[in-house]
Image: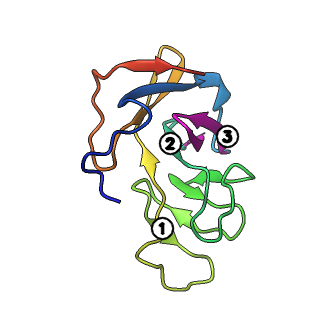
Amino acid sequence: MSDTGYVPPFPKGWYVVADADEVPGPDLVAFNAFGRDLVLGRDADGAVRATQDLCPHVGGLFSQGGRITDGCIVCPFHGWTYGPDGRCVAIPTGEPIPDRARVRMWAVREREGRIEVFHCRRGQAPDPDAEVHDRR
């Protein structure tokens, strides 16, 4: 389906998904925002990362023991590892990485003790001045 003409059910903007203290470390924590199941975790520098709560390998949930290691999201079931851009960067068995092995990553910012995730069509850059929605 093409994005042309499609009107998303949630407006483009920043969505408050959690308080900063709800995401304390590298263990991935499940949240729901703008109708999507997401996981949030912190890398070693304390920056928050957000992605879908579903590994495309066999459909395991990242929230069931996944974590951020060396800046990458690691699936708890088979260890598939996804880099900051969402592309799979490692498969523990050493198999070739499929071109389509990737997860969607969302832009995240932390302000005033809240974690906000930017919702838009894929490929659009986050707008720092877009409206903030707090629907927690």
Q: Quadrant of residue 5?
A: top left
Main SS of residues in magenta: strand
Q: Nearer the viewer, residue 37 or 45?
A: 37
Find numbered disc 2 in the image and state the secondary structure of the residue it sits on: strand
Q: Is residue 35 magenta?
A: yes
Q: Which residue is mark 1?
A: 88
Who comes first in sequence, dot 3 or dot 2? 3
Q: Residue at x 48, y 67 (%)?
A: 88
Few, some or many C-alpha atoms within 10 Å of disc 1 (few <14, some 14-19, many ≥20)? many
Q: Is residue 51 above or below residue 31?
A: below
C-beta proximity under 8 Å, tags 2 and 1: no
Q: Is residue 67 magenta?
A: no
> In the image, which residues are magenta?
28-42
Q: Which residue is mark 2?
A: 49
Amino acid under label 3? Val
Q: Residue at x 35, y 31 (%)?
A: 12
Please tell me the numbered disc located at residue 29.
3
Amino acid under label 1? Cys
Who comes first in sequence, dot 1 or dot 3? 3
Q: Position of residue 74 (x, y in %)?
A: 61, 59
